[in-house]
Amino acid sequence: MTKSTPTFIQFSFYSIFFYFLLLVSHASNQLHHEDQVVLLKLLQYWQISYYGWSSANCTPADCSPPPDLITSINGSVTKLVLQHQGIALVPPFICDLKNLTVIDLGENNIYSELPKAFYNCSKLEYLNLSYNNLTGTVHNDIHCMARLRHLYLGYNNIYGKLPKGFYNCSKLKYLDLTGNYLYGTIHGDIHRMSRLGFLNLGDNCFSGNIPSSIGQLTELTTLQLFNCQFNSSFPLELGNLSNLEVLDLSDNTGITPTKFPSNFTHLKKLKSLRMSMTNLIGEIPYTIGEMTALEHLDLKKKHGLESTWKLTTFQRLNFTESDILSKLTENNVIGSGGSGRVYRVAINRSHDVIAVKRFWSNKKLEEELEREFFAEVRILSSIQHSNIVKLLCCISNDNSKLLVYEYLENHSLDQWLHGKSRASTVSDSVHHIILDWPKRLQIAVGVAQGLCYMHHACSPPIVHRGVKSSNILLDSEFNAKVTDFGLAKMMIMQGEQVTMSTVAGSFGYIAPEYAHTTRVNEKVDVFSFGVIPLELATGRKANHGGEHTSLAEWAWRHIQEGNPVVDALDEEVRENSYLEKMCCVFTLGIICTGTQPSTRPSMKEVLQVLLRCN
């Protein structure tokens, strides 16, 4: 069936878009003029957008960023929290905001050495640049940030030795350098950082001795030195850290074989002790039983099945591969699909839960599944967003491949909208639970945010190719997370078309140009996404309308025949107070599923409209 975009539908979309743009008011936030000018310059330099708010719409006289991003006190900007914004560079004028105390730019794409521009922030107390692409060494003059209390530089590409000047950061209380490529020894001068309460230098390449002077850091509650290359025994002075609650020395295989340090049992506040893979010998002292606060103890000599399984981590883990492999049983299966099974696995004493996807072992499918596995690993290990499912690690050997994700309690959107008795498959309740309209709209916004990030913040852009309601997972608060990136494709540049060897996807969600030409770009995802608002607004499945007719075609026909939009809406959530918003979302779905890719909006425009609908 072919269709053309009716003029009134185009008018409806742009009317909705323009109307809701006008509703957004940018009330003055009473900033001093100097801070207003610098803030606008900074936000436009970074092209910041957030829940529909955009720096592009700002002027010096009228720019009120959301309070989640910017905090001001007495007319001065004091706090910038700009995670997941695709920020690549830090401009030298950032500290023209002279009263900044907090800068949080974690989980961006900053690719440079630690910017010295921060040195000019004379009041800076908190700096988070973790999960970026920082390179280079730690500067010898880093102590110039004299008031700094919190420094988070974990999971970057920082390398080299820690310079002596680093140990002059005497006011630091929290220091996290985990997951970098730092090497050499940790100098004994570390005792000069006497206010440290949290110290994480793990997952680096430090060697030599663990300095005994760490035992003088008596305010420490957390000490993590895991997965390094230390090659001496553990200093007994660590037993002097009377306030210590977490101690992780695991995966230091070069440590001199030694007995369990007896004075570690003096750490009466210790809750977690990890010393696996550290060449411990002899008996475990009975006095460990006197450590009454201890909740987690790991003294294993080796990881289970380490000779056959390879573990690749993307986050800090509180489990091992053996914790997972032993629980991949039929009783723990929660779903299966074309590429494999998904298991719900409870780990550790706190009964934290993760999701494990095990790819099928099938020689006929081996090459295709291998592609899907590595596509998913490549994509998810390179991106971080609150509306994209978090990949924790992958585990593989010659015969099997596993992906381990965060677990989402409320399962998939498909189960809530179309499962047996709708929610009975995701709830212990026997009642007919309906996903109310506010939650449906929240879900639509979340999915749009995830896809918007993939299309507009990632470089190169990422096309999912498999957007559908069963690939939208929901957490305990019904926040949506896009999952299943096995079909995803990285573009070379935005708007580029790539020809695929085969068509992949599910009936009802596949864009017509993709089905006919196998060419894909971001507009393929826009079409697939457009079906989801139609599902949310109507309660119907994507294949509604018969064997050869999809929900998108049914919705278009409903409008073309002159039927009221209201008649198409889901009666179970169709309340008078929601009608305008439901019609807005339904209309957006119509526009997104237009036959011609050029008539479909971008995901950035889609997100703006949804936020106005909200």
Image (tube, rainbow, N blue to C red):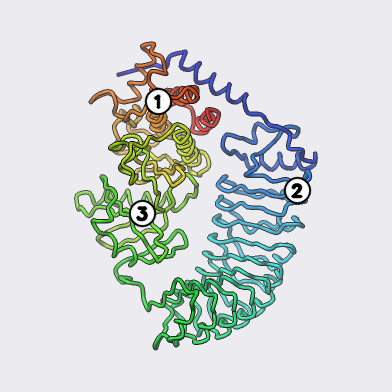
**Left or right: 215 with respect to 560?**
right
- Asked if the residues shown at circle 1 and circle 3 are in contact, with their CB atoms under 8 angstroms apart, the answer is no
Which residue position is annotated with label 1?
593
Which residue position is annotated with label 2?
97
Give the residue displayed 45% in from the left and 80% down from the top.
254
Tell which circle, 3 or 2, labels the residue nearer the N-terminal end.
2
Counting from the top left corner in percent of width and height, residue 451 is at 46, 39
Counting from the top left corner in percent of width and height, residue 47 is at 62, 39
**Left or right: 510 with respect to 390?**
left
**Left or right: 324 with respect to 590?**
left
Q: Nearer the viewer, residue 329 or 576?
A: 576
Which residue position is annotated with label 3?
355
- Image: 300 above or below 155: below
Q: Nearer the viewer, residue 519 or 401?
A: 401
Q: Check disc 2: other Cα within 10 Å, few if <14, some if 14-19, many if 20+.
A: many
Q: Which residue type carries mark 3?
A: Ala
**Alpha carbon separation for disc pair 3 and 2:** 44 Å
Q: Which residue type carries mark 1?
A: Thr
Tell which circle, 1 or 3, labels the residue nearer the N-terminal end.
3
- Image: 69 above or below 233: above
Tell which circle, 1 or 2, labels the residue nearer the N-terminal end.
2
Give the residue displayed 42% in from the left and 39% down from the top.
463
